[in-house]
Amino acid sequence: MRLRHNLPLQILIALVLGTGAGLLWPQGHALIGGWQPYSLFDFLGTLFLRGLRMVIVPLIAGSIITGVAGAGQGSGLGRLFTKTFAWYVTTSLLAILLGLLLVNLIQPGLQHGVAVGPRLGLTLQDADLAAKLQDKSTGDLVGIIQRMVPVNPVAAAADGQMLPLIFFCLLFGIAIGKLDPEHRASQLRFWESLFAVMMRITGWVILTAPLGIFGLMAKVTATSGFAAFAPLLKYALTVLAALVLHAVITLPLLVRTIGRLPAGRHARTMLPALLTAFSTRSSSATLPLTMDRIENGAGVSNRVSSFVLPLGATINMDGTALYECVAALFIAQAYGVHLGFGAQFVVVLTALLASIGAAGIPAAGLVMITIILDAVGLPLEGIALILAVDPVLDMCRTAVNVWSDSCGAVVVARSEGEAGVLSNKSSNK
Ligand code: ASP
Protein backbone atom coordinates (compact mmCIF):
# COMPACT_ATOMS: atom_id res chain seq x y z
CA MET A 1 0.00 0.00 0.00
CA ARG A 2 1.56 3.31 -1.05
CA LEU A 3 -0.09 5.29 1.74
CA ARG A 4 1.66 3.15 4.32
CA HIS A 5 5.08 3.79 2.82
CA ASN A 6 4.73 7.48 3.56
CA LEU A 7 3.23 6.97 6.99
CA PRO A 8 6.21 8.11 9.13
CA LEU A 9 6.52 11.30 7.09
CA GLN A 10 2.78 11.92 7.21
CA ILE A 11 2.78 11.46 10.98
CA LEU A 12 5.74 13.80 11.42
CA ILE A 13 4.02 16.48 9.36
CA ALA A 14 0.83 15.93 11.39
CA LEU A 15 2.81 16.37 14.62
CA VAL A 16 4.28 19.68 13.51
CA LEU A 17 1.05 21.00 12.01
CA GLY A 18 -0.94 19.90 15.07
CA THR A 19 1.46 21.63 17.47
CA GLY A 20 1.28 24.82 15.40
CA ALA A 21 -2.50 24.72 15.04
CA GLY A 22 -2.95 24.29 18.80
CA LEU A 23 -0.70 27.26 19.55
CA LEU A 24 -2.42 29.39 16.91
CA TRP A 25 -5.94 28.56 18.06
CA PRO A 26 -5.91 27.88 21.82
CA GLN A 27 -8.93 26.43 23.56
CA GLY A 28 -11.79 28.96 23.58
CA HIS A 29 -10.54 30.77 20.44
CA ALA A 30 -13.46 31.25 18.04
CA LEU A 31 -13.32 31.83 14.30
CA ILE A 32 -16.06 32.96 11.94
CA GLY A 33 -19.55 32.24 13.23
CA GLY A 34 -18.26 31.40 16.73
CA TRP A 35 -16.86 28.08 15.54
CA GLN A 36 -13.96 26.85 17.67
CA PRO A 37 -11.10 24.95 15.97
CA TYR A 38 -10.57 23.18 19.29
CA SER A 39 -13.75 21.19 18.69
CA LEU A 40 -12.25 19.83 15.47
CA PHE A 41 -8.96 18.90 17.24
CA ASP A 42 -10.95 17.14 19.92
CA PHE A 43 -13.12 15.35 17.36
CA LEU A 44 -10.18 14.02 15.32
CA GLY A 45 -8.13 13.01 18.35
CA THR A 46 -11.00 11.28 20.09
CA LEU A 47 -12.04 9.40 16.95
CA PHE A 48 -8.53 8.06 16.44
CA LEU A 49 -8.20 6.95 20.06
CA ARG A 50 -11.57 5.25 19.89
CA GLY A 51 -10.49 3.42 16.73
CA LEU A 52 -7.36 2.14 18.46
CA ARG A 53 -9.26 1.09 21.55
CA MET A 54 -11.87 -0.62 19.37
CA VAL A 55 -9.33 -3.10 18.02
CA ILE A 56 -7.27 -3.73 21.15
CA VAL A 57 -9.25 -6.42 23.00
CA PRO A 58 -9.99 -8.78 20.06
CA LEU A 59 -6.56 -8.11 18.55
CA ILE A 60 -4.73 -9.03 21.73
CA ALA A 61 -6.92 -12.00 22.49
CA GLY A 62 -6.43 -13.35 18.95
CA SER A 63 -2.75 -12.59 18.97
CA ILE A 64 -1.89 -14.17 22.32
CA ILE A 65 -4.07 -17.23 21.83
CA THR A 66 -2.73 -18.03 18.36
CA GLY A 67 0.82 -17.19 19.43
CA VAL A 68 0.78 -19.39 22.53
CA ALA A 69 -1.30 -22.22 21.08
CA GLY A 70 0.95 -22.38 18.04
CA ALA A 71 4.18 -22.20 20.06
CA GLY A 72 4.75 -25.95 20.02
CA GLN A 73 1.95 -26.94 22.35
CA GLY A 74 3.25 -24.85 25.19
CA SER A 75 6.85 -26.08 25.04
CA GLY A 76 9.48 -23.35 25.06
CA LEU A 77 7.05 -20.95 26.64
CA GLY A 78 8.89 -21.00 29.95
CA ARG A 79 12.11 -20.06 28.18
CA LEU A 80 10.36 -17.25 26.29
CA PHE A 81 8.89 -15.95 29.52
CA THR A 82 12.26 -15.96 31.32
CA LYS A 83 13.98 -14.08 28.50
CA THR A 84 11.18 -11.57 28.19
CA PHE A 85 11.01 -10.94 31.91
CA ALA A 86 14.80 -10.60 32.15
CA TRP A 87 14.66 -7.93 29.43
CA TYR A 88 11.88 -6.05 31.20
CA VAL A 89 13.59 -5.94 34.57
CA THR A 90 17.12 -5.27 33.30
CA THR A 91 16.19 -2.39 31.01
CA SER A 92 13.86 -0.81 33.58
CA LEU A 93 16.58 -0.96 36.25
CA LEU A 94 19.17 0.54 33.89
CA ALA A 95 16.72 3.34 33.12
CA ILE A 96 16.07 4.03 36.79
CA LEU A 97 19.78 4.10 37.66
CA LEU A 98 20.44 6.55 34.83
CA GLY A 99 17.65 8.79 36.13
CA LEU A 100 19.06 8.53 39.64
CA LEU A 101 22.51 9.55 38.46
CA LEU A 102 21.28 12.59 36.52
CA VAL A 103 18.89 13.85 39.19
CA ASN A 104 21.70 13.70 41.76
CA LEU A 105 24.13 15.44 39.42
CA ILE A 106 21.80 18.15 38.12
CA GLN A 107 19.74 18.61 41.31
CA PRO A 108 16.75 20.26 39.61
CA GLY A 109 14.98 20.73 42.97
CA LEU A 110 17.63 23.17 44.18
CA GLN A 111 18.55 26.61 42.93
CA HIS A 112 21.86 27.98 44.21
CA GLY A 113 21.65 25.32 46.91
CA VAL A 114 18.19 26.41 48.08
CA ALA A 115 15.08 24.21 47.73
CA VAL A 116 12.76 25.58 45.03
CA GLY A 117 9.59 24.27 46.67
CA PRO A 118 8.25 27.53 48.09
CA ARG A 119 8.71 29.32 44.74
CA LEU A 120 6.63 26.65 43.02
CA GLY A 121 3.77 26.93 45.53
CA LEU A 122 4.69 23.86 47.54
CA THR A 123 1.88 24.38 50.00
CA LEU A 124 -0.59 23.86 47.18
CA GLN A 125 -3.38 21.46 48.11
CA ASP A 126 -5.12 19.73 45.29
CA ALA A 127 -8.47 18.55 46.54
CA ASP A 128 -9.01 16.31 43.53
CA LEU A 129 -5.64 14.69 43.86
CA ALA A 130 -6.68 11.90 46.21
CA ALA A 131 -9.60 11.00 43.98
CA LYS A 132 -7.41 10.99 40.88
CA LEU A 133 -4.88 8.76 42.60
CA GLN A 134 -7.53 6.32 43.67
CA ASP A 135 -8.63 6.16 40.10
CA LYS A 136 -5.46 5.22 38.32
CA SER A 137 -2.97 3.61 40.66
CA THR A 138 -3.07 -0.14 40.50
CA GLY A 139 -1.61 -0.49 43.98
CA ASP A 140 1.02 -2.72 45.52
CA LEU A 141 2.61 -5.87 44.14
CA VAL A 142 0.35 -8.32 46.00
CA GLY A 143 -2.68 -6.42 44.70
CA ILE A 144 -1.33 -6.48 41.15
CA ILE A 145 -0.85 -10.25 41.28
CA GLN A 146 -4.31 -10.79 42.74
CA ARG A 147 -5.98 -8.69 40.10
CA MET A 148 -4.22 -10.61 37.35
CA VAL A 149 -6.64 -13.46 37.88
CA PRO A 150 -9.99 -12.28 36.50
CA VAL A 151 -13.14 -13.23 38.36
CA ASN A 152 -14.90 -12.99 35.04
CA PRO A 153 -12.76 -12.98 31.87
CA VAL A 154 -15.58 -11.58 29.74
CA ALA A 155 -16.03 -8.66 32.12
CA ALA A 156 -12.25 -8.08 32.12
CA ALA A 157 -12.32 -7.95 28.32
CA ALA A 158 -15.36 -5.69 28.31
CA ASP A 159 -13.67 -3.29 30.75
CA GLY A 160 -10.41 -3.37 28.80
CA GLN A 161 -8.44 -4.62 31.83
CA MET A 162 -5.26 -5.73 30.15
CA LEU A 163 -3.40 -7.83 32.72
CA PRO A 164 -6.32 -10.16 33.59
CA LEU A 165 -7.13 -10.44 29.89
CA ILE A 166 -3.54 -11.35 29.03
CA PHE A 167 -3.45 -13.87 31.86
CA PHE A 168 -6.64 -15.58 30.71
CA CYS A 169 -5.59 -15.64 27.05
CA LEU A 170 -2.24 -17.18 28.00
CA LEU A 171 -4.08 -19.96 29.85
CA PHE A 172 -6.50 -20.37 26.97
CA GLY A 173 -3.66 -20.68 24.44
CA ILE A 174 -1.75 -23.17 26.58
CA ALA A 175 -4.94 -25.23 27.00
CA ILE A 176 -5.49 -25.32 23.23
CA GLY A 177 -1.96 -26.63 22.83
CA LYS A 178 -2.83 -29.52 25.14
CA LEU A 179 -6.03 -30.58 23.31
CA ASP A 180 -6.38 -33.64 21.11
CA PRO A 181 -5.44 -32.93 17.45
CA GLU A 182 -9.03 -32.61 16.22
CA HIS A 183 -10.12 -30.00 18.74
CA ARG A 184 -6.80 -28.24 18.63
CA ALA A 185 -6.99 -27.82 14.84
CA SER A 186 -10.49 -26.36 14.89
CA GLN A 187 -9.67 -23.94 17.72
CA LEU A 188 -6.46 -22.85 16.04
CA ARG A 189 -8.24 -22.24 12.74
CA PHE A 190 -10.85 -20.10 14.43
CA TRP A 191 -8.41 -17.95 16.38
CA GLU A 192 -6.00 -17.57 13.47
CA SER A 193 -8.81 -16.32 11.25
CA LEU A 194 -10.04 -13.96 13.94
CA PHE A 195 -6.53 -12.63 14.33
CA ALA A 196 -6.20 -12.13 10.55
CA VAL A 197 -9.46 -10.15 10.51
CA MET A 198 -8.28 -7.97 13.39
CA MET A 199 -4.94 -7.25 11.72
CA ARG A 200 -6.81 -6.12 8.62
CA ILE A 201 -9.05 -3.77 10.60
CA THR A 202 -6.02 -2.51 12.53
CA GLY A 203 -4.34 -1.66 9.24
CA TRP A 204 -7.32 0.54 8.33
CA VAL A 205 -7.20 2.33 11.68
CA ILE A 206 -3.47 2.92 11.24
CA LEU A 207 -4.11 4.68 7.95
CA THR A 208 -6.00 7.38 9.85
CA ALA A 209 -3.07 7.99 12.23
CA PRO A 210 -1.91 11.29 10.66
CA LEU A 211 -5.33 12.90 11.13
CA GLY A 212 -5.70 11.55 14.65
CA ILE A 213 -2.23 12.63 15.66
CA PHE A 214 -2.80 16.10 14.26
CA GLY A 215 -5.87 16.37 16.50
CA LEU A 216 -4.17 15.01 19.61
CA MET A 217 -1.13 17.30 19.30
CA ALA A 218 -3.27 20.34 18.62
CA LYS A 219 -5.34 19.54 21.71
CA VAL A 220 -2.29 19.46 23.99
CA THR A 221 -0.82 22.76 22.85
CA ALA A 222 -4.26 24.40 22.61
CA THR A 223 -4.91 23.54 26.25
CA SER A 224 -1.61 24.27 27.96
CA GLY A 225 0.53 26.31 25.54
CA PHE A 226 4.18 26.71 26.45
CA ALA A 227 3.79 29.16 29.34
CA ALA A 228 2.88 26.53 31.91
CA PHE A 229 6.20 24.78 31.50
CA ALA A 230 8.64 27.61 32.32
CA PRO A 231 9.22 27.23 36.11
CA LEU A 232 9.82 23.50 35.86
CA LEU A 233 12.24 23.65 32.97
CA LYS A 234 15.26 22.27 34.83
CA TYR A 235 13.30 19.32 36.18
CA ALA A 236 11.74 18.58 32.78
CA LEU A 237 15.13 18.81 31.07
CA THR A 238 16.61 16.34 33.57
CA VAL A 239 13.88 13.81 32.79
CA LEU A 240 14.24 14.43 29.05
CA ALA A 241 18.03 14.10 29.10
CA ALA A 242 17.80 10.77 30.93
CA LEU A 243 15.07 9.51 28.58
CA VAL A 244 17.08 10.46 25.52
CA LEU A 245 20.26 8.82 26.84
CA HIS A 246 18.36 5.63 27.64
CA ALA A 247 16.63 5.57 24.25
CA VAL A 248 19.59 6.44 22.03
CA ILE A 249 22.48 4.85 23.93
CA THR A 250 21.48 2.14 26.42
CA LEU A 251 18.76 0.37 24.43
CA PRO A 252 20.49 0.49 21.01
CA LEU A 253 23.66 -0.79 22.68
CA LEU A 254 21.75 -3.78 24.05
CA VAL A 255 20.10 -4.40 20.67
CA ARG A 256 23.53 -4.35 19.03
CA THR A 257 25.43 -6.40 21.58
CA ILE A 258 22.87 -8.96 22.79
CA GLY A 259 20.71 -9.16 19.67
CA ARG A 260 23.48 -8.39 17.13
CA LEU A 261 20.93 -6.37 15.21
CA PRO A 262 21.03 -2.98 13.45
CA ALA A 263 19.46 -0.62 16.00
CA GLY A 264 19.20 2.30 13.55
CA ARG A 265 17.19 0.29 11.06
CA HIS A 266 15.00 -0.96 13.88
CA ALA A 267 14.30 2.63 14.97
CA ARG A 268 13.30 3.61 11.43
CA THR A 269 10.97 0.62 11.23
CA MET A 270 9.35 1.53 14.54
CA LEU A 271 8.99 5.27 13.86
CA PRO A 272 5.21 5.28 13.21
CA ALA A 273 4.60 3.40 16.47
CA LEU A 274 6.94 5.67 18.45
CA LEU A 275 5.29 8.81 17.12
CA THR A 276 1.88 7.37 17.90
CA ALA A 277 3.01 6.57 21.45
CA PHE A 278 4.26 10.14 21.72
CA SER A 279 0.97 11.65 20.70
CA THR A 280 -1.48 9.23 22.32
CA ARG A 281 0.50 9.02 25.60
CA SER A 282 -0.66 5.44 25.89
CA SER A 283 1.37 2.27 25.39
CA SER A 284 -1.81 0.20 25.29
CA ALA A 285 -3.46 2.36 22.65
CA THR A 286 -0.26 2.18 20.57
CA LEU A 287 -0.11 -1.62 20.79
CA PRO A 288 -1.80 -2.29 17.43
CA LEU A 289 0.83 -0.18 15.67
CA THR A 290 3.67 -1.68 17.67
CA MET A 291 2.54 -5.18 16.68
CA ASP A 292 2.12 -4.19 13.05
CA ARG A 293 5.63 -2.70 12.85
CA ILE A 294 7.27 -5.56 14.72
CA GLU A 295 5.63 -8.28 12.63
CA ASN A 296 5.25 -6.63 9.23
CA GLY A 297 8.22 -4.28 9.47
CA ALA A 298 10.89 -5.99 11.57
CA GLY A 299 9.87 -9.51 10.54
CA VAL A 300 9.43 -10.94 14.04
CA SER A 301 7.24 -14.05 14.27
CA ASN A 302 3.75 -13.80 15.73
CA ARG A 303 4.78 -16.38 18.32
CA VAL A 304 7.31 -13.98 19.87
CA SER A 305 5.59 -10.66 19.23
CA SER A 306 2.25 -11.81 20.62
CA PHE A 307 3.98 -12.83 23.80
CA VAL A 308 6.44 -9.98 24.32
CA LEU A 309 4.43 -6.96 23.17
CA PRO A 310 1.04 -7.15 24.94
CA LEU A 311 2.77 -8.01 28.19
CA GLY A 312 5.39 -5.33 27.60
CA ALA A 313 2.78 -2.64 26.92
CA THR A 314 1.39 -3.28 30.37
CA ILE A 315 4.37 -4.08 32.54
CA ASN A 316 7.57 -2.99 30.78
CA MET A 317 7.86 0.77 31.15
CA ASP A 318 11.45 2.00 31.14
CA GLY A 319 10.47 5.60 30.54
CA THR A 320 7.92 5.56 33.33
CA ALA A 321 10.33 3.89 35.77
CA LEU A 322 13.02 6.47 35.06
CA TYR A 323 10.54 9.30 35.33
CA GLU A 324 9.17 8.03 38.66
CA CYS A 325 12.65 8.02 40.16
CA VAL A 326 13.61 11.51 38.92
CA ALA A 327 10.24 12.97 39.92
CA ALA A 328 10.33 11.53 43.44
CA LEU A 329 13.86 12.79 44.05
CA PHE A 330 13.00 16.16 42.56
CA ILE A 331 10.09 16.46 44.97
CA ALA A 332 12.36 15.51 47.87
CA GLN A 333 14.93 18.11 46.80
CA ALA A 334 12.25 20.76 46.36
CA TYR A 335 11.00 20.09 49.88
CA GLY A 336 14.56 20.35 51.16
CA VAL A 337 14.54 16.68 52.26
CA HIS A 338 17.85 14.86 51.89
CA LEU A 339 17.41 11.22 50.92
CA GLY A 340 20.36 9.04 51.92
CA PHE A 341 21.60 5.89 50.21
CA GLY A 342 19.03 3.64 51.91
CA ALA A 343 16.11 5.87 50.98
CA GLN A 344 17.36 6.18 47.39
CA PHE A 345 17.55 2.41 47.22
CA VAL A 346 13.90 2.23 48.31
CA VAL A 347 13.09 4.77 45.57
CA VAL A 348 14.78 2.57 42.95
CA LEU A 349 12.89 -0.55 43.99
CA THR A 350 9.52 1.13 44.32
CA ALA A 351 10.02 2.92 41.00
CA LEU A 352 10.49 -0.48 39.39
CA LEU A 353 7.32 -1.86 40.99
CA ALA A 354 5.35 1.30 40.26
CA SER A 355 6.30 1.12 36.58
CA ILE A 356 5.17 -2.51 36.45
CA GLY A 357 1.90 -1.60 38.13
CA ALA A 358 1.20 1.50 36.00
CA ALA A 359 -1.41 0.97 33.34
CA GLY A 360 -0.50 1.83 29.75
CA ILE A 361 -2.72 4.91 29.74
CA PRO A 362 -2.03 8.66 29.88
CA ALA A 363 -0.80 10.00 33.25
CA ALA A 364 -0.75 6.57 34.89
CA GLY A 365 2.91 7.09 35.81
CA LEU A 366 2.16 10.40 37.46
CA VAL A 367 -0.26 8.90 39.92
CA MET A 368 1.93 5.90 40.65
CA ILE A 369 4.50 8.27 42.18
CA THR A 370 2.37 8.23 45.32
CA ILE A 371 3.66 4.72 46.00
CA ILE A 372 7.22 6.04 46.07
CA LEU A 373 6.43 9.19 48.03
CA ASP A 374 4.60 7.05 50.52
CA ALA A 375 7.50 4.59 50.80
CA VAL A 376 10.04 7.28 51.66
CA GLY A 377 7.66 9.41 53.72
CA LEU A 378 7.29 12.44 51.48
CA PRO A 379 4.01 14.40 51.36
CA LEU A 380 1.74 13.32 48.52
CA GLU A 381 0.97 16.97 47.72
CA GLY A 382 4.40 17.06 46.10
CA ILE A 383 2.74 15.69 42.98
CA ALA A 384 1.00 19.01 42.50
CA LEU A 385 4.43 20.46 41.75
CA ILE A 386 4.99 18.43 38.64
CA LEU A 387 1.46 18.43 37.20
CA ALA A 388 2.07 21.29 34.78
CA VAL A 389 4.83 19.59 32.82
CA ASP A 390 3.42 16.10 33.03
CA PRO A 391 1.67 15.91 29.64
CA VAL A 392 4.89 16.61 27.74
CA LEU A 393 6.95 14.23 29.86
CA ASP A 394 4.21 11.62 29.51
CA MET A 395 4.55 11.85 25.73
CA CYS A 396 8.28 11.27 25.85
CA ARG A 397 8.23 8.50 28.45
CA THR A 398 5.47 6.63 26.61
CA ALA A 399 7.56 6.68 23.42
CA VAL A 400 10.51 5.27 25.41
CA ASN A 401 8.23 2.60 26.94
CA VAL A 402 7.16 1.43 23.48
CA TRP A 403 10.73 1.64 22.16
CA SER A 404 11.92 -0.67 24.94
CA ASP A 405 9.11 -3.17 24.24
CA SER A 406 10.03 -3.21 20.57
CA CYS A 407 13.75 -3.65 21.30
CA GLY A 408 12.82 -6.53 23.63
CA ALA A 409 10.77 -8.15 20.86
CA VAL A 410 13.60 -8.15 18.30
CA VAL A 411 16.24 -9.26 20.80
CA VAL A 412 14.09 -12.11 22.13
CA ALA A 413 13.13 -13.16 18.57
CA ARG A 414 16.78 -13.23 17.59
CA SER A 415 17.70 -15.27 20.65
CA GLU A 416 15.00 -17.75 19.64
CA GLY A 417 16.89 -18.29 16.40
CA GLU A 418 14.71 -16.18 14.08
CA ALA A 419 17.02 -15.32 11.21
CA GLY A 420 14.74 -12.94 9.31
CA VAL A 421 14.58 -10.25 12.01
CA LEU A 422 15.48 -6.83 10.60
CA SER A 423 17.02 -8.45 7.54
CA ASN A 424 16.94 -6.52 4.27
CA LYS A 425 13.93 -8.52 3.19
CA SER A 426 11.85 -8.02 6.33
CA SER A 427 12.33 -4.38 7.21
CA ASN A 428 11.10 -1.13 5.72
CA LYS A 429 7.86 -2.63 4.58
N1 ASP B 1 1.46 6.94 29.60
C1 ASP B 1 2.41 5.91 29.90
C2 ASP B 1 2.19 4.72 28.99
O1 ASP B 1 1.10 4.49 28.53
C3 ASP B 1 2.37 5.47 31.31
C4 ASP B 1 2.79 6.61 32.16
O2 ASP B 1 1.97 7.46 32.47
O3 ASP B 1 3.97 6.70 32.49
O4 ASP B 1 3.11 4.00 28.72
Image (tube, rainbow, N blue to C red):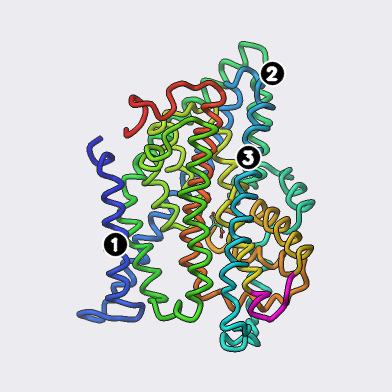
Few, some or many residues within 10 Å of mark 3 (<14, 14–19, 20+): many
Q: Which amino acid does label 1 sit on?
A: Val
Which badge, 1 or 3, comes first in the chain's sequence? 1
Label 1: which residue? 16
Q: Which amino acid does label 2 sit on?
A: Lys
Specify whether residue 58 is in view.
no
Quarter residue 169 falls in: top right
Few, some or many residues within 10 Å of mark 2 (<14, 14–19, 20+): some
Foreground: 70 or 322? 322
Few, some or many residues within 10 Å of mark 1 (<14, 14–19, 20+): some
Is 83 above or below relative to 341?
above
Span colored in magenta:
331-339
Residue contact between numbered discs 2 and 1, judged by CB atoms under 8 Å? no
- State the CA–CA distance, disc 1 to disc 3: 36 Å
Label 3: which residue? 166
Residue at (63%, 78%) from the top-left corner? 128
Q: Quadrant of the C terminus?
A: top left
Magenta stretch encompasses residue 335: yes
Is 178 above or below relative to 106?
above
- State the CA–CA distance, disc 2 to disc 1: 51 Å
Is 240 placed left or right of 364 in the picture? left
Which badge, 3 or 2, comes first in the chain's sequence? 3
Specify whether residue 373 is in view.
yes
- State the CA–CA distance, disc 3 to disc 2: 19 Å
